[in-house]
Amino acid sequence: MPRDFKILEEADLQPLALGAALLGTGGGGNPYIGMLRTRELLRKGAKIEIMPLEALPDDAWVGECGGIGAPVVGVEKVEEGGECHRAMMAVEEAAGVKMSAVISAEIGGANSMEPIIVAGLAGLPVVDGDGMGRAFPEVQMTTFFIYGAKPSPAAIADDKGNVVVFRDMVDMFWLERFARDVSVGMGAGAGFAVAPMRGDFIRKTAVPGTVTQAISIGNTVLSARAKHQNVVERIVEETGAKLFFTGKITDIERNLVGGFSRGTAKISGVGDWAGSEAEIAIQNENLVLWVDGEAVIMVPDLIMNLELETGEPITTEMLRYGQRVAVIGLPVHDLMKTPRALEIVGPAAFGYPDLTFKPL
Amino acid sequence: MIRIGIDVGGTNTDAVVMNGNDVIAGVKSATTPDVMTGVVNALKDVLAESKMDASAIDVVMIGTTHFTNAVVQRRDLAQTAAVRLGLPATASLPPMVDWPEDLKKAIGNHTWLAHGGNEFDGRVISPLNEEELLGIAGEIQSRGINTIAITSVFSPVSNEFEKRAGEIFAKAIPGAHITLSSEIGRIGLLERENAAIMNACLRDLSAHVIEAFRNAIAETGIRGRFFLTQNDGTLMDAAFAEQFPVLTFASGPTNSMRGAAFLSGVHDAIVVDIGGTTSDVGSLQKGFPRQATVAVEVGGVRTNFRMPDVFSIGLGGGSLVIDGPDGIKVGPTSVGYRIKSEALIFGGSTLTTTDVTVAAGNADLGDKGKVGHLDKDLLDRTQAKILAMLEDCVERSRLSPDPLPVIVVGGGSILVNGPIGGLQVIKPNHFGVANAVGAAIAQVSGEIDRVYALAEIGREQALNDAKARAIDAAVAAGALRESIEIVDVEDVPLAYLPGNATRVRVKAVGELHVAGAKNAA
């Protein structure tokens, strides 16, 4: 295996956190705490390699892991640190394999950092890719599960040393349900690892290059700010995204449905969009953008809300009346747009059966 | 009620005397290096101007940047022990992990992790271990530290562990200054812990500063009670302020916005506070500044205080005006407090915004003859630039397309002489001392921030419980119960959690109840 992979450096962490927050499309939690944890690991001497997808041997075992619970719990009950690693070791033991690399379930938000931390603790490389290319709220919504990854054995571990192994799961929906319940029992913040996946499978199903993509987006934002450039414009140029709306939030409505915060944000246009009205449906992430009544972006394509002046990504929990925002859209990776994927992550799966997915 | 409001800023110390809702007198005097001389001078001046006898003053309210500056300048900070209760959780990030190195060094970087803490729903993470805490107390004592900040996971939900640990330390280290994080901040462990540690390291200083304020007031013969203003525009009595100096952070912008609302009688507006070097622009909603929603940094440290959402630009009465190849440049460099010697109208040699305003005939200040030579084109272009800068930040602070008025206050208000961006401009009487007026009219508040399991008690009942607790907190802080209003209710469902757990934040505000104020100076 060639070993000249990029080494994650401390200088990459702030851009990575910023890029991951952006790719979180309003959800996924804040990567700040995870960034500090990764920084502590690097300062203690951990060496973390970022491994390109194509470098993965066919027979390598890859571990997917991430935090599960409520983001607001994560900012208060900071992790013990080894939760995800313990969950992954329990999976290794139950499956009788040793992992060769670690991969993120979702590059968006807080979970961008968790596999990197596991990689640092386990002395493994982290794969440059993930299972979403963005953030989504539920376990089954990764490309891995969509294209047939096994739902078990999986494991969940808490800060206290409790480890629960899910030995035989009928499907990924059952896994999501049980894992969610156990995570609440563990204080709504726990480490989660799923069944080992083979290198050839990961190469075919992972959204490629997303760790380095997040770092690069973050660097774009930081350099634009440093040079007093228009941050939103620079992001659009660098990522191939498109600006769909700028305006001010005029109304936020939130309801709690089935454990998820769902609602809508209304935006009144400014600048080129003066006189227009937009609306964003939010669950934990931004789901659909309507401009003057027409649905112009919808899941699984990425809808990103940025603070107009600074380009700072705004999470759905942080949306407030009066914020000035730019809404940009980025096409999701093709793996997320097949008919099979759309069954799991298309508009209907998020409660919009009347919307037919129109890709960007 | 006769009251004096004082705002101790970096350049000026402003003071006003108010009788009920009337401003009797307002003065500006220079802030002195020792601060107290400036405060005594301001008190004497304002009493003289008001022709009031010192004995007639019921209350003195002070807004000060003293404690913010101590942190920013890393001076007068005590060696502080940071103790966190939460093991085995939180072990991945020690206290002060995100502090600038020099500040960490200034207070010694003494940190301990211990067992304790709660889950979001109140369950215990691990029981408190008294022996472990006694061991830590021994180490703190052996390092000669007398100041302790205690933070427990989810203490805004349950603060019993913090209280118990505080008792243990108080007994083991008699006379120690102890700060509990639950008394200061809200949910967000690192930010709340940071605030608690900053508060703790200011406790030695606060004892001296409060004593000095007390002496300055006594020296002028005033026998009234004495309060400090907090970052949310409400008051704390002197004894409370001594314990919680960190709550004075950012009280300056809040006071000027509250003062602007009071003086103009307009409660929904954009406020532009123009000083010597900068202008602070913020949005006023129902008479209170809109709060920032993101973490606010003080001296390089992230906190989650209730800070006003204020946007600053480098434009003030002392800003330099330079006519260069790219056109007119105004600020951010400023002559600051040296305006009295460096501006052209005062016989200096630096062209400032104030000179341009006087030359254009929009203010009568200094020696107009010294700016007679400035050509009209330069004056026009400079004034257009100033207006464009103000328009830009007013536009950024607007919350709706409604044509809200703009209230302009502060010593640099003379720079504004007409509408900004088509919006009506109000320059109230006493605009130069609006911040001192804001201090004088400050009210008393109580706030709570809790997570409720709505599956158990229902939303209505949870909100009522939260409101009742907030009102009780306001009364405990010195508010007159009958005058209390609930000014802010926010309930945010905790995403990804079944059981409808909801975080509820309620703030109650009332008029100061002088007779009932506890521990007054």
Image: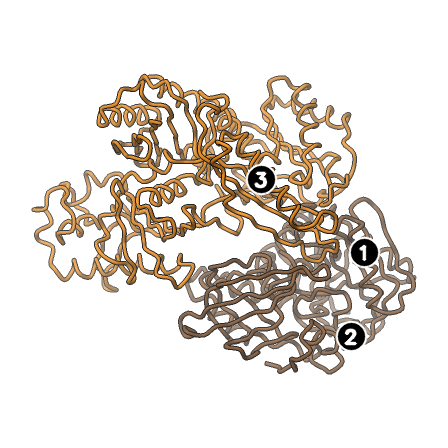
Chain colours: A brown, B orange
Q: Mark 2 lies on which chain?
A: A
Q: Mark 3 lies on which chain?
A: B
Numbered mark located on residue B185 in the image:
3
- Counting residues from the N terminus, which is met first, the one under dot 1 or under dot 2? 2
Please give left or right for residue B354 compared with residue B389 in the image.
left
Tag 2: residue type? Answer: Ile
Q: Residue at x 52, y 52 (%)?
A: B293
CA gap, disc 3 and disc 2 = 43 Å
Q: Quadrant of the N terminus of chain A?
A: bottom right
Q: Which residue is drawn at 62% across and 30% down?
A: B81
Tag 1: residue type? Answer: Asp
Q: What element carries label 2?
A: helix
**Residue under numbered circle 2:** A146
Q: Nearer the viewer, mark 1 or mark 2?
A: 1
Numbered mark located on residue A181 in the image:
1
Q: Mark 1 Cα within 10 Å, few/some/many (few <14, many 20+)?
A: some
Above-or-below relation of B311 to B446: below
Q: Position of residue B8 (x, y in %)?
A: 35, 33
Q: Position of residue B61 (x, y in %)?
A: 39, 30
Please give left or right for residue A155 compared with residue B162 in the image.
right
- Does the CB distance between marks 3 and 1 fall below 8 Å? no
- Viewer-nearest residue: A224 or A162: A162
Q: Where is residue B412 in the image (x, y as percent from the top left)?
A: 26, 46
